[in-house]
Structures are given as structure tokens and as C-alpha cells.
Amino acid sequence: MCTVAAFAIGMGVTKTVAGIAEQNRQHANQVDAVNRSNAMARQNYINQITISAYEDQRKGEVFTAKLKADAASRAAYFKQKELNQAEATRATVANDQQLREKINEQMFASQANLAKAIQAQGTVLASGMSAGQSMLLELNQAERDLGFAQAQIDATVFDATRNYGIQQYGIDLSQYSGDMKARNSITTSASVAPYASFMTPRPIEQQAPRKPSALGPILSGISTGLGTATTLGGKDYFSSMEIFGGKQGDNG
């Protein structure tokens, strides 16, 4: 009977130890899984922060480059506008000088024609020609020649003035066209500043499961021991033991 009890107790202890070991193994696996999940979540959080920081830095660098390009295009516009104004001024001065030279030339020609007419009239008067229709015709002819010459001078001055206006219009139009072309080259690519990335949400750490109680394996071991004793000693095994008040007590 002691052998049955010892074997039953051994089976119960073995069941208890095995149960506790399996319980601890499962608990350790669960803890490892939670730790791995938390570690992966933390690493992913760090990766997302690193990526966001890099993207924000790149957006800032691109925006800064656009600002510099826009500033350079505006500086180039004002520089080109200065050059256009300088060229327009040069062309206007040259056009003015050409007109003045033409007018001065015709003024000298007008004075020369007037002197020629006076000389012609003086020649007629000094010729000793008797006063009459012939002398009058000669004098009138000198005046007509002067009038024709002056008309040619007036026409030349008119044409020169008109040509001056046409040239000046072309100068102004060329300057305006150059200014508009330079203005259209101004870039405004950095009109809107980039937005920073959204804050990466911090991961919620999972809690490791609590270590299970050993009560379950102990009860299972006791149940196994009792079942083993009943199987080996029979269903009346425990009733025959003194501890349960069986026959051993009666024999005493």
C-alpha cells in the first residue's frame, strides 16, 4: 500500500512540476512576444520620426533654394531694366542729335538761300535796268526761287521731325518690350512655405501578462495523484487507510 501511495505521490508531483514548467514556458513566450512587439513599435516610432525629420529638412532646403532662385530672378529683372533704360537713353540722345543736326543743316541752308536771294535782287537793282515790268519780273523771280528753296527746307525739316517721332516710338516700344520680357522671367516658385510633417504618434506600450498562479498545476497534480492511487489501489483504497478511518483503525 505504501508503494501505491509513493507512486501516486510521485505522479502527482511530476504532474505538478510539469504543469508549473509548462505554465512558466507559456508565460515566458507571452512576455517575449509582448517585448518584441513593444521593441518593434518603438523602432518603428523612431524610424517614422527620423523619416519625418529628413523630409522636413529636404522641404526646407528646397524652399530655401526656391527663395534664392526667386530673389535672383528679381535681381536679374531690375538689372535688365536698368540696361534697357540705359539703351533707351542712348538711342534717344542719338535720335535727338540726328534731328538737331538736320535742323541746323536746313537753317544754314535757309540762311544761304536768303543771302542768295538778296544778292540776286541787289544784282538786278545794280544792273542799271530801268524801273518797270522787266525789273519787277526779275525781282519776283528771285523771291520765287527763295520761296521754292524754303519750301524744300520746310519739307525736309518736317520729314526729319516725323522720322524722329517714328524712331522715338520704336525706342520706347523696344524698351517696353524688353522690360516685359524681363518681368516675365521673374519666378515665384516659393510663394507658399512648406508645412511641417504631422507629429508621429507615440506607440502605446503593451503590458506583459502577469505570472500565473501555481495553484492550478498543484491542484492538477493532486488530482492526478488521487486518480493514480484510485486506479492502482482500487476504489476502496482510501477507505482502507487509517487516515480516512478505515479497517486499520478497527484492528487496533
Image: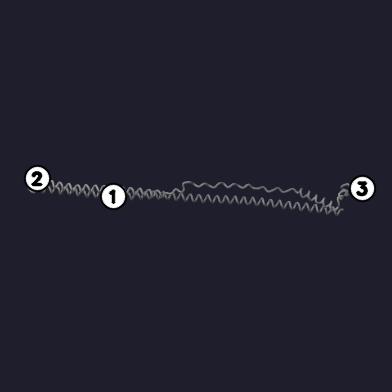
Compare residues 138 and 185 and report the one nearer the observer: 138
Q: Is residue 122 left or right of residue 170?
A: left
Q: Secondary structure at mark 1?
A: helix
Q: Position of residue 160 (x, y in %)?
A: 25, 49
Q: Nearer the viewer, mark 2 or mark 1?
A: 2
Compare residues 77 and 138 and report the one nearer the observer: 138
Q: Is residue 202 left or right of residue 215?
A: left
Q: Which residue does the image show at 76% across and 48% down from the upper left? A: 216
Q: Position of residue 196 (x, y in %)?
A: 53, 47
Q: Which residue does the image show at 9% across and 45% down from the upper left? A: 133
Q: Is residue 48 left or right of residue 110?
A: right
Q: Nearer the viewer, mark 2 or mark 3?
A: 2
- Looking at the rendered structure, the kind of residue marked 2 is Gln
The residue beneath circle 3 is 250
- Number of numbered labels in the structure image: 3
The residue beneath circle 2 is 133
- Looking at the rendered structure, the kind of residue marked 3 is Asp
Q: Earlier in the sequence, mark 3 or mark 1?
A: 1
The residue beneath circle 1 is 95
What's the mark number on residue 202?
Answer: none
Q: Which residue does the image show at 81% across and 53% down from the upper left? A: 11
Q: How is the image coloured?
A: one colour
10 Å crowding of disc 1: few (<14), some (14-19), many (20+): some
Q: Secondary structure at mark 3?
A: helix
Between the residue at mark 2 and the residue at mark 3, the CA separation in whole angstroms equals 196 Å
Compare residues 141 and 33 and report the one nearer the observer: 141
Q: Position of residue 105 (x, y in %)?
A: 22, 50
Between the residue at mark 2 and the residue at mark 1, the CA separation in whole angstroms equals 49 Å
